[in-house]
Amino acid sequence: MCATCGCGVAGVRVFGPGQLGPAGHGHGTDHENGHAPGHDHDREHKHRAGHEHEHEARHAHGPEDRTVELQQKVLAKNDRLAEDNRTWLTARGILAVNLMSSPGAGKTTLLERTAREAGAGLGLTVIEGDQETTLDASRIEAAGCEVAQINTGAGCHLDASMVARGLHALDPRPGSVLVIENVGNLVCPALFDLGEAARVVLSSVTEGADKPIKYPQMFRGADLVLLTKVDLLPYVDFDTERHAQDLKLISPGAQILPLSATTGEGLPAWYAWLAERAR
């Protein structure tokens, strides 16, 4: 169990390219198999064994202390593994982007069109995170992009260990762009470093303009905010000025880019942003 948010991580499965199977039912490996290139097996085993020490910590402190202690231990362990991922990616010149949003904001649709229109030039590969099925990974693969699917089971977010296994399955080529589509959730994914070089958050006009102030942890860490589904602005009650002002208060350095994966508005700027970050 994840001691930060209480979600389960025991049912994690990884599906590499060629393992997705028909109708979204893949045939992959469970989360204990495979390690990212360059990762030390004994070290990861020790990290997993650390749950035993966390169990002891629950009995060594009072009710208030143990919650903080457990969260610190879980995040510290994740951060060490994230640095391993980052070192491996940086050594190969791979730009890793952590793509996050609430469910239905348009992450997969955006990646489908990105794969078709700019995937070859970027050398795009994708790690797809969902609780179950390989449906989204199959959509991205059909768009011409190599993809690894991670099913988190009861887990509500990806973590660095899961991404390490995704890297092992995908093995992206040096100099490429890797997009990690996180589980749809505006809370816990913000807490977990995956080893990425940049964080991109999608904010859909169908969700309402108040998301930056309601979920500040997510937007505070964003390098880029994509305001999606702007083709629907004439039909929804969305205050773009308020959204931009709130985002500036939460994250003054974050860039905002309006786009529509349906009409293509804003997509050239998105592709240019990826290419520039990759350079």
Image (cartoon, rainbow, N blue to C red):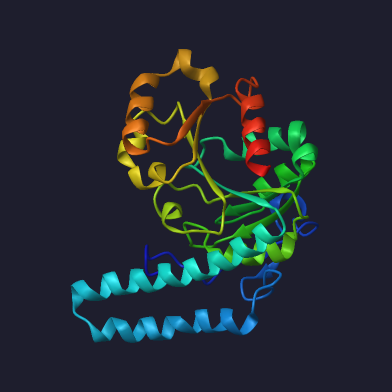
**97 up-or-down from 15: above or below:** above
**Residue at (58, 65) in percent of width and height:** 162
**Residue at (62, 31) in percent of width and height:** 270
**50 up-or-down from 134: above or below:** below
> In terms of depth relative to the viewer, which is nearer, 12 or 203?
203
Q: Quadrant of the N terminus?
A: bottom left
| Residue 64 picture quarter | bottom left
Where residue 55 sits: x, y (%)?
36, 83
**Residue at (41, 67) in percent of width and height:** 75
Q: Is residue 36 left or right of residue 240?
A: right
How many tags in the picture?
A: 0
Q: Is residue 12 visible?
A: no
Where residue 142 sits: x, y (%)?
78, 42
**Residue at (48, 61) in percent of width and height:** 155
Q: Quadrant of the C terminus?
A: top right
Where residue 45 sits: x, y (%)?
57, 83
Q: Is residue 93 visible?
A: yes
Q: Is residue 224 left or right of residue 174?
A: left
| Residue 171 picture quarter | bottom right
Where residue 241 sits: x, y (%)?
36, 20
**270 up-or-down from 235: above or below:** below
> In terms of depth relative to the viewer, which is nearer, 9 or 118?
118
| Residue 117 picture quarter | top right
